[in-house]
Amino acid sequence: MPSPSANTRPDDDSVDLDALPETVASGSTLLVATPEPIDGYALPLRIADRYARSDECRLVVTATVDAERTIRQQLSLSPSPAPGFGVVDATGDEHLLSLYQEYPTVYLPYPGELAHVSLALWELETALSPSRPNPHLIFRSLSPLLAEDSLERVTNVLGRLIEQRRSSGSLTVLGIEYTAHDEHTMAALRALADAIVWVDTSPDARLELDYRRIRNR
């Protein structure tokens, strides 16, 4: 299995998001479908940043890029002061809690069991509340989780997490490498989303985004 940092490009600030709408409905769920891991672009973070206010909190689950790089990428996107930000880092090999640092982090063994991920998100939200309630939720990539757990279990847990975000008006952004999954899996994930952002790479290595609404909200 490749290391979590494999197949990434250098952090890049030239991603064009003009193909995306200027706003989305409160509580929306967006599925970001890329053909391969492109973690250097931090696309789920960028898309969340487009729609979240600068003073709103984000919780990020990552099994592809470690917490240090995820935090660095978020800080490069956010105006000063940076938003409240917590990370579930499932790239390592042990379970550790660092809840009282500037950017609270829960470390889980790769790729993170869903039950542990859900508990870690609750711990992060508790650590960040009440000063920054109702955080937005970002999964950098669902592919590692789907490689280790059943589709039914993944979608059931995601459905509950999404409903929690939706009821509080918070955004959910889900990354997925669609070439690693069959149509049945992609259909099940689309059923959770309000819109899907299809991503492709142009001949000059720039990202091309295609926003497709799934349901009206």
Image: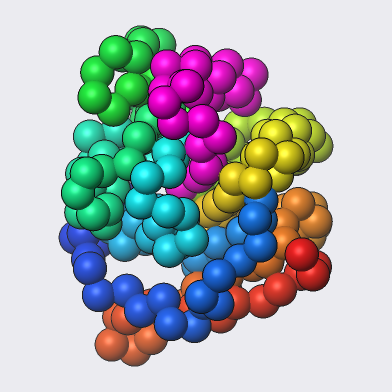
User: Taking 55 as reference, is 36 above or below it?
Assistant: below
User: Taking 30 as reference, is 99 above or below it?
Assistant: above
Q: Relative to residue 174, is residue 90 drawn left or right? A: left
Q: Relative to residue 64, is residue 154 drawn left or right? A: right
- Asked which colour scheme the image uses, the reply is rainbow
Residue extent of the magenta highlight: 112-140
Q: Residue furthest front?
A: 131
Q: Relative to residue 206, is residue 156 drawn left or right? A: right
User: Taking 63 as reference, is 173 above or below it?
Assistant: below
Residue 120 within the magenta-colored segment of the rendering = yes
- Picture residue at 61% right of the left edge, 59% below the top: 30
- Picture residue at 46% right of the left edge, 47% below the top: 140
Q: Position of residue 66 (x, y in %)?
A: 30, 35
- Quarter of the C terminus within the rendering: bottom right
Q: Relative to residue 164, is residue 12 drawn left or right? A: left
Q: Position of residue 16 (x, y in %)?
A: 35, 79
- Picture residue at 27% right of the left edge, 53% below the top: 78
